[in-house]
Amino acid sequence: MKRRHVWMARYLPPGVDPSKSEMGLLTGLISALLFHLQFILRYLSARNGLYTYYHGNLKQLNGTIMPAFSEILGTSLYGCFVAALAMVVVAVQLYSSYYQGSKSIYTMRRLPDRWERWRRVLTIPALAALGYLLLAFVLRCLDFVIYMLCTPEQCLHPYSWLELLNLL
């Protein structure tokens, strides 16, 4: 076992490979970030709709406004929420690992610390779920900053600052 996985092995049931668990968490992170790219694509599409080419020059259309932030954000954060919900399945799989192989559930039930079994089942999935939800919050704040700073002021949706209250 590599040294970087020592901390993770303390919070996993016996026989569970920490490197595979780390790869699963990393896969969830990458999937959530790739799913989030749809915000960038929607934003760029909406921003390009503010302009037109007139005799080869880029010209801003008068009176056009950007769609609301929540409309552009859409479902781009669902990847983080799905990854967080997947941690429930991971916790069930970790619990079921006690019943496979050498039946270590009997050993875990006899330990003096009765919470050791649950600590090994729930710690990594709970931390990962919190991490995914924190990532969703940070991405939403970052998206709002991009929306407010990169959109021309005259094209901002009216009351777009009220969307800031939805972030909290």
Image (cartoon, rainbow, N blue to C red):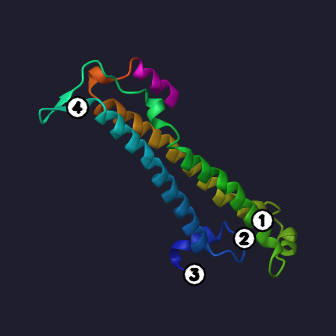
Q: What count of labels does the image hold? A: 4
Query: In the rendering, at what x and y percent does residue 136 appear?
Result: 51, 44
Q: CA distance from mark 4 to mark 3?
A: 59 Å
Residue under numbered circle 1: 95
Q: Is residue 84 left or right of residue 101?
A: left
Please tell me whether residue 47 belongs to the stretch shown in magenta. Answer: no
Nearer mark to the viewer, of 4 and 2? 4
Residue under numbered circle 2: 13
| Mark 4 burial class by Cα count in 10 Å: few <14, some 14-19, many 20+ | few
Q: Is residue 95 above or below residue 157?
A: below
**Judging from the image, what secondary structure is the residue with disc 1 in?**
helix
Q: Nearer the viewer, residue 155 or 150?
A: 155
Q: CA distance from mark 1 to mark 3?
A: 22 Å
Q: Is residue 14 above or below residue 163?
A: below
Query: In the rendering, at what x and y percent does residue 163 appear?
Result: 46, 25
Q: CA distance from mark 2 to mark 1?
A: 8 Å
Give the mark nearest the N terminus, 1 or 4. 4
Based on the displayed image, in which of its 4 quarters is residue 117 positioned? Answer: bottom right
Please tell me whether residue 160 belongs to the stretch shown in magenta. Answer: yes
Please give the name of the residue rendered at 46% of the width and 54% of the height, measured from the top-left corner: 34
Q: Amino acid at mark 1?
A: Tyr
**Judging from the image, what secondary structure is the residue with disc 2 in?**
loop
| Mark 3 burial class by Cα count in 10 Å: few <14, some 14-19, many 20+ | few
Q: Which mark, by number, is residue 52? A: 4
Please give the name of the residue rendered at 52% of the width and 77% of the height, measured from the top-left corner: 3
Give the mark nearest the N terminus, 1 or 3. 3
Q: Are marks 2 and 1 in contact (CB under 8 Å)?
A: yes
